[in-house]
Amino acid sequence: MTTRFSSSVLVVIIAGLSFAMAPVAAQTSANPAQPAARAKPPAASWTPSKTPWGDPDIEGVWTSDSVFTIPFERPAQLAGRAELSDAEYQRRVEQDSRTRSAAENAIGSFRADTAWINKSFRQSSLIVVPPDGKIPPLTPQAELRRAPRDGGTFGDGPFDGPEDFTLYDRCITRGIVGSVLPVIYGNGNRILQTPGQVVITYEMVHDTRVIPLDGRPHIGQRIRQYLGDSRGHWEGNTLVVETTNLTDQTSIGANGNGLRHSSGMKLVERFTRTERDVLRYEVTIEDPQTYTRPWKISLPLTSPAGFYLLPYECHEGNHAILNSLSAERAEDKAIQDDAKKGVIRERRRVQGLSFAQTVGDDSVLVPLLVGEGAPPAEPSR
Amino acid sequence: MRSPRAPGPALRSATLAAAVVMTTLTVAAQTARTAPSTYVPPRLSDGKTPDFRGIWQVRDTPYVNIEGHPAEKGIAAARSIVIDPADGKIPYKPEALARKQENYRARATSDPSLKCYQAGVPRATYLPSPLQILQSPGNLAIVYQENHAFRVFQPETRPHFDSADWWMGDTRYRWDGDVLVADVVALTDELWLDQAGNYHSADVHVFERYTMTTADTIQYEARLEDSNVYSRPWTLRTFLQRVKQAGARIIEDECLEDANGVRHHISPSDPRSLLKTDLSRRKKP
């Protein structure tokens, strides 16, 4: 085993029992992708029903699985275009179909949740603002914040203690945005509505946000939480949630990995149900200490038939940190032993394993990389 | 990591049959002892579903030892919350009692909660921290402050998962009049029931009853059936009190990030052999 063994993979092995469930569920769903789905269905064409107390109904189980093949940042060959051409879209439909069947037909205990892809979309990137679809330039002080820890078990280490890993590796949290961005599994969002409150639960790392809608002020500035302090209100059929009181310990990226933002960050999320089974999720990131301008991610969450959240016990089965640390200590010893023999060498570097290589099946991601340029900003997708 | 589940299918059926008989007896005994609540809870917006929403917490200290315990520094003495059997003792089989006693002796280091693991069912109910019951018509979930655990209560029409073992189990529920009735399986055998080392096996079946007895009180009962460990099913009962402080809320709780939690990340091996630098040095800017 290498030092850089992906924590995701380890969790899969450890939580094998939980994930043995996924294929069963996936087989029963087996929804073919709906090629007719449009990137932005006209909002006026579909009106959500109301809850008994009169709020727009966004309740249900939602997942970002269907946008797994949309790049986070816009690839160079799609520069200047927010949507795919018809021919490109057709390729994406085929790619989604391949990705889904690869997941459905995977053998063994691991099967990516891409088996739940049930719609294809025309979006060329998940980032929609700025209009070039790229993360805005970082401020100079944000560049100083970069640390080996930002990549976690996908990074170069060295791993000398728990703080050298990301909060995701440590099973603490993926943060708000990291909990919604699509990854290989655990993409479920469960929304429950009640008069005066909206509750959102994320499957992976089992976080829950209870969001009051009664207009109360934010809590005191001295109270800081990984998931911040959220306040919601309705603007027409859109739930708008504003979050402050965040920490400087989480990041905007898949699984919450990546460069850490500042504690002054403010998030504005917008949830709009545009079809019965599509919930448009938008989040605007305002953090002048980190990004030179605000930016926005937009993605459709879908609700495939039969999909729901399973228990996700991250910390209880987290051997990734244990194994990474023990491998590093083995390398310490190997370096010392070599030195005694007169061989002075550098610490072994990460081998550049992609996620697909670590799971031994690159059929899922290769079409993505070949067909649509650079991989997403975070390698852990 | 886990030992295989004890009984095979045939034995399981036999066990189940025995359990059904015992269940019937237990329920009869229970009914005789429990006066039904006359309180009628409010309804959700559908006008039908009992409304159990709110932030709740058990205010006494069964988390220390559900069989009762003497006073300790900062903790008041408490009686057993085991109501059946009447002696307040969990009816362990002899060999299981020996393991419980071993757990008790090692409780300062062996309690899975020390490693920041989720508490399981029923333990999560009577932790010294609040929980929040979330409901809308047709939906029910409980979020526990400790380790931000949650349970989604699935309607009984959905079959239980088999062959899984989870830290918060797999819950099915229905309404028995105004009583929330849930049954929970698929719990891991790594869980304890309290800080005193009381435990169950992976085959445990937990039957919960949540009864609102006043506007601010939920009577919580859990019956545990587990023929691997207990000589008969047994029942505990405690009370959840509504947390009424203005602005009460579930507060973010990350057991893992405290100074000890850092070490918990790398349990069960000896962390000292894996940590290259010590924590106090690394905390300096």
Image (cartoon, grey):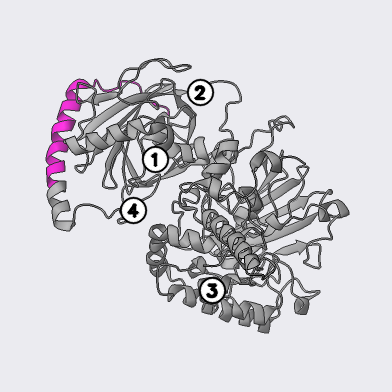
Residue topped by disc 2: B243
Depth check, mark 2 against mark 1: the one in front is: 1
Q: Residue A290: x and y, percent? A: 81, 52
Which range of residues does the magenta coloring cover? B17-42
Q: CA distance from mark 3 to mark 2?
A: 48 Å
Residue A59, numbered circle: none
Q: Secondary structure at mark 3?
A: loop
Q: CA distance from mark 4 to mark 3?
A: 42 Å
4 and 3 marks in contact (CB < 8 Å): no
**Other-residue count near label 4 (Cα within 10 Å), few / some / many at <14 / 14–19 / ≥20:** few
Same chain under badges 3 and 2? The reply is no
Residue topped by disc 4: B2
Q: CA distance from mark 4 to mark 1?
A: 16 Å
Residue topped by disc 1: B120
Mark 3 belongs to which amino acid?
Answer: Gln
Query: Which subunit holds the residue at mark 1?
Result: B
Residue A34, numbered circle: 3
Q: CA distance from mark 4 to mark 2?
A: 38 Å
Q: Secondary structure at mark 4?
A: loop
4 and 2 marks in contact (CB < 8 Å): no
Q: Secondary structure at mark 2?
A: loop
Q: Secondary structure at mark 1?
A: loop
